[in-house]
Image (cartoon, rainbow, N blue to C red):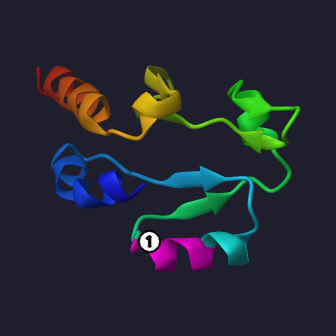
Amino acid sequence: MQAYQAGIAKFEATDTQVFGLSVDSVPANREFAKQIGVTFPLLSDFKRTVVKDYGIFNEEQGFGNRATFVIDKEGIIRHIDEGNSAIDPTSVVEACNILTRKKAN
């Protein structure tokens, strides 16, 4: 999440909203965001609804696997990074840039 925060200007330049999602509680997410210096919203999926709907729920351990989704303004998933590749925002920034260029044309 810190890499996404460090590159937040790149996302803002493409009219992109960045947010995190965790299965932790709202107070725990708030404290975590403070600790790591994240200013974008960190949402709580305490009931694990979203992680199940997006197919990233680890039933055995009870948490959502690390993943990044780029969803366009029509609600269509355009890009997914999963696992360790979701930590680096490079491909996500590029996906957002591509969507911005397509929108401009």
Q: Which quadrant, please, contains the C terminus?
A: top left
The magenta span reads 30-37
Asked if residue 75 lies left or right of residue 26, the reply is left
Q: Position of residue 56 (x, y in %)?
A: 69, 29
Number of numbered callouts drawn: 1
Q: Position of residue 57 (x, y in %)?
A: 76, 33
Please report the residue visible at 69 percent of the width from the left and 73 percent of the height from the top. Answer: 28
Q: Secondary structure at mark 1?
A: helix
Label 1 is placed on what type of residue?
A: Ile
Q: Can residue 71 be seen in the rendering of this structure?
A: no
Q: Position of residue 86 (x, y in %)?
A: 44, 34
Residue 52: name its quadrant: top right
Asked if residue 11 lies left or right of residue 38, the reply is left
Residue wearing tag 1: 36
Q: Main secondary structure of the magenta part?
A: helix
Q: Position of residue 53 (x, y in %)?
A: 75, 29
Q: Can residue 97 be seen in the rendering of this structure?
A: yes
Vertical arrangement, residue 92 with respect to residue 38, above or below? above
Tell whether position 57 is magenta: no
Vertical arrangement, residue 49 with respect to residue 85, above or below? below
